[in-house]
Image (tube, rainbow, N blue to C red):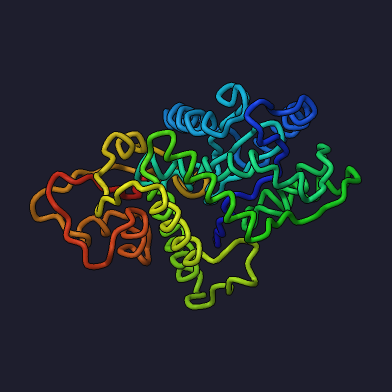
Amino acid sequence: MYRQLMFAAALVAAAPAAAQSISQQDRATGAQADPQLVKEFGGRYSGPQVSLVERVGRRVAVQSGLSNAQSDFTITLLDSPVENAFAIPGGYVYVTRQLLALMNSEAELASVLGHEVGHVAARHSASRNRTATIGGVLAGVVGAVAGNGAAGQLASTVARGGAQLYTLRYGREQEYAADALGVRYITAAGYDPYAAADMLASLDAETGLQSAAAGRSGQQLPTWASTHPNGADRVRRAAQLAQQTGKPMLDPPPEDTAFLRALDGLAYDAKGAGKRIRIRTVKAGDTVDTFARQMAYDSLQRERFLTLNALDDDVRLTPGRLVKVVTKE
């Protein structure tokens, strides 16, 4: 199944000024849309990782300047096998378990959520003059989230209700603006600002991996043809934003062992596939290939292992390090 990340496919309406907060109209619209969106995009995930996502999301949201941001935002981990993150009016922010599995630090999770909060604070959807009705919210998410089978079902449901379907595409400048706000928020929250570039690089690598798995290697959409900026472009820009914070770059960054251990047992891929993320400790004599053989796939085992752990092809694993593998239950 080809899974294309639509990073920050948000339909949001919130005021940017610190003295303001999310409007009552947006709260009502989001509260009405949330149950159906959750249902159509896999339901709420119920694993122990939920509290981690909620905690990090609120820690980042409070940096936006929106009053009562911690309580105003609802952060949801979706039980979906598609790498995705998006938001709707009322401060509802969503991230899928499949995207969470690709992350290697709490700071990377913060960068994804910070980008979404950035769209909220900048009122990007308001600038597009979209009416925040329940039908518009659902249709906007359908149009923006590609590669999800549930999206087609939801589109049909909304269409039968008479709502006009449209595809929500932020302009590149709005995406870059949300990237900039996200870096600002995670830095203020005490996270490594370079994590945003690391996360975008992982997403770019995952897109290439999925294309290779589907037999489309080398056929990526060019920057101008994409609904979102090209991965390489955004990685470079995110690194520049991090440099502008004045924070030193740690190369390599320290391993976030607490975060990795928190991912152990996370469901992976399609429901019913019986696959989970497992955290392994590297022992003397272990190599990339020994771990790659543990990956529950018939093809591209080495490539999948490297991408999941954001590792270079020539990496040498050191004893004591933690790595992720995908195994059958």
The residue sitting at the right extreme is: 162
Q: Is residue 293 left or right of residue 210?
A: left
Residue 248, x across and y down, in percent = 29, 49
The quadrant of the picture occupied by the C terminus is: top left
Residue 251, x across and y down, in percent = 25, 54
Residue 58, x across and y down, in percent = 51, 28
Residue 8, x across and y down, in percent = 60, 49
Relative to 270, does residue 47 appear above or below in the rendering?
Answer: above
The quadrant of the picture occupied by the N terminus is: bottom right
> Residue at the spot x=46%, y=44% of the render?
111
Relative to 76, does residue 163 appear above or below in the rendering?
Answer: below
> Residue at the spot x=66%, y=36% of the render?
16
Front-most of 176 and 209? 176
Front-most of 70 and 84? 70
Front-most of 213 and 250? 250
The residue sitting at the bottom extreme is: 218
> Residue at the spot x=63%, y=44% of the render?
119
Q: Is residue 49 left or right of residue 313?
A: right
Relative to 226, does residue 165 appear above or below in the rendering?
Answer: above
Relative to 157, does residue 169 appear above or below in the rendering?
Answer: below
